[in-house]
Image (tube, grey):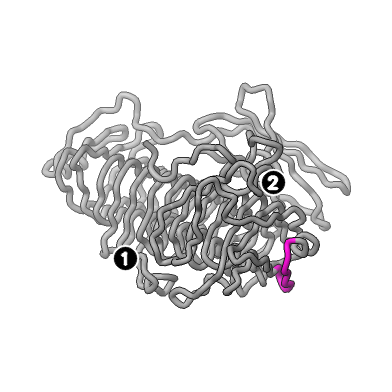
Amino acid sequence: MQHLTIEWPFTGDENANSTVTVRYRAEGESTWRQAMPLRRIAAGDNEGFSWGLRHSGSLFGLQSGTRYEVELTLSDQDGGGTTRTATVTTRAVPTPMAGAPIKAVTPSTFAAVAASTQPGDILELGPGTYGAFDWSRSGTEGKPIVLRGTQGTVLTGPINLYNQRYVHFDRVTINGRLRFNGTNHFALTRSTVNATSANNGDAIVTFLRAENAYIADNVVTGVTQWAESSLGVNGNNQGEGICVTGPGHVIMNNRVSGFRDGISLIEDSDAKDQYSIDIVGNDLIGNADDGIEADFCFHNCRIIGNRLTNNFIALSSQPGLGGPTYFIRNAVYNAVHVAFKLYRGSSGDVLLHNTVVKHGDALGVYADTPVSNLFSRNNLFIGGPGGTFGGYSSGNAAGRVLHIPTLATANADLDHDGFGSTSGTFSATWGATTLTSLSALRTSTTEKHAVQVDLGVFASTVAYPSAPMTLYTAPDLRPGAGSAVENTGTPIPNITDGFSGSAPDLGAHEVGAPLPVYGPRP
């Protein structure tokens, strides 16, 4: 709805120096806008999946339901090149059919009305408690079936939709699990979902390939407690808050708390076509394994503008399957273990304008496999003295600013990032190399424009999360005027457009900008 995936397979270019620049404009506009060049993705394989040689990337911040012209220019300095154009339309936000018939329903009449429901119908669910059910009617494009709650509507799960199309749930309370296996164009909006210990503690899930779900503006609450015994994959935790597989899903502005994983993709051989997935503007709180688990992303998963507070691991890419997997303008506070879990040979992760304040190493990746093709710009990472929680380390006692011992340095491209530790030291591990100063980081790595920062860069007081098992209130992580992060970044087309000052600011926010809406919108 807001973003667009571009894939361009090619052959040749043995020395890997071809590029693809991108311009775009809404149809009817005269002025072209520049976007980021596509990422060059080398062919590879990992964890039973393989991918081909291609240029790949995304357009960001588009309007939904709008036609765009896109121009791609491929160039190879060794000779050759071409320009191609395409006209594409972003998906519209799901809405009921204009003039849709509204059918009043009560718990006692629900089964009979449901059995005769036609595409385009709105079932207005009156107050009362509705028992578990399997939904077996589909809408069509432009004529979705809508189940809309009123004050006092409570659905008792489990609720199952198997292999349906164009079914929307709106403004309902669900106590239990909603599962939409194999269902395309499913929507769940403005609702409350309370998981129970039944059905593994899950809330909103599809365990089979589905397409183009829209899950937005919901409050999703699990049964996992924020405690040291809950931490990690083997902790005393249960439940996936929102879990999907398949392409095209939009998971937007939800508040998800108290699960093993807050928002997740399916892992391992069960992962099906996990690309063009947008996880945007969500508020993730107190999840005992991953806040957002973007594991087994095939390409162009876009994790943008989320706030993650008090999560064991904030953002996971375990692994990215070639990429790009985008993590952009996420605000992380009190990630206990790591802010970014780039494990199991993750390749093609792109980190842009994220803010991290955590216990222990500011940017620590403790993978025992190579972290390949990592790209990073304009991020802000602040840590401090580390410790051990639930058997997992948050970092060493000094609090390294950067620690990626398995970084594939030959294809890593990190620059213009801010690093700091409340210990006052500056220690970094760049692959096999240990560095002990900002100047050494700048001289010996791609971080030629890195800056050293501390908690004083924020406009409001931000405390070091010294007791990670505390459920901290999310702090305001906007930077202060005149701080070390102001005007310190590098422009990124289609990402930093409209920045104030002489250059973009580091981190998730610009100085003086309003906070985004995290979680359900008014």
Q: Which residue is mark 1?
A: 200
Q: Please give left or right for residue 212 compared with residue 384 in the image.
A: left
Relative image position of residue 210 (x, y in whole percent): 43, 51
Distance from label 2 to label 1 (Cα)? Answer: 46 Å
Range covered by the magenta-colored residues: 430-438
Relative image position of residue 30 (x, y in whole percent): 67, 22
Q: Foreground: 323 or 484?
A: 484
Residue at far bottom of view = 391
Q: Please give left or right for residue 5 compared with residue 187 in the image.
A: right
Quarter-of-image position of residue 413: bottom right
Is 396 placed above or below 86 here?
A: below
- Tell me the kind of residue under disc 2: Thr
The earlier-in-sequence mark between 2 and 1 is: 1
Residue lying at 64% horizontally and 43% vertically, measured from the top left = 482
Quarter-of-image position of residue 373: bottom right
Numbered disc 2: secondary structure: loop
Numbered disc 1: secondary structure: helix
Q: Foreground: 227 or 300?
A: 227
Residue at far right of view = 78
Q: Which circle marks residue 350 in the picture? A: none
Residue lying at 79% horizontally and 64% vertically, measured from the top left = 444
Relative image position of residue 432 (x, y in whole percent): 72, 73
Q: Nearer the viewer, mark 2 or mark 1?
A: 2
- Tell me the kind of residue under disc 1: Asn
- Are the two marked residues, 2 and 1, in contact with CB atoms closer than 8 angstroms? no
Is 232 placed above or below 133 here?
A: below
Q: Which circle marks residue 488 in the picture? A: 2
Is 279 placed above or below 502 here?
A: below
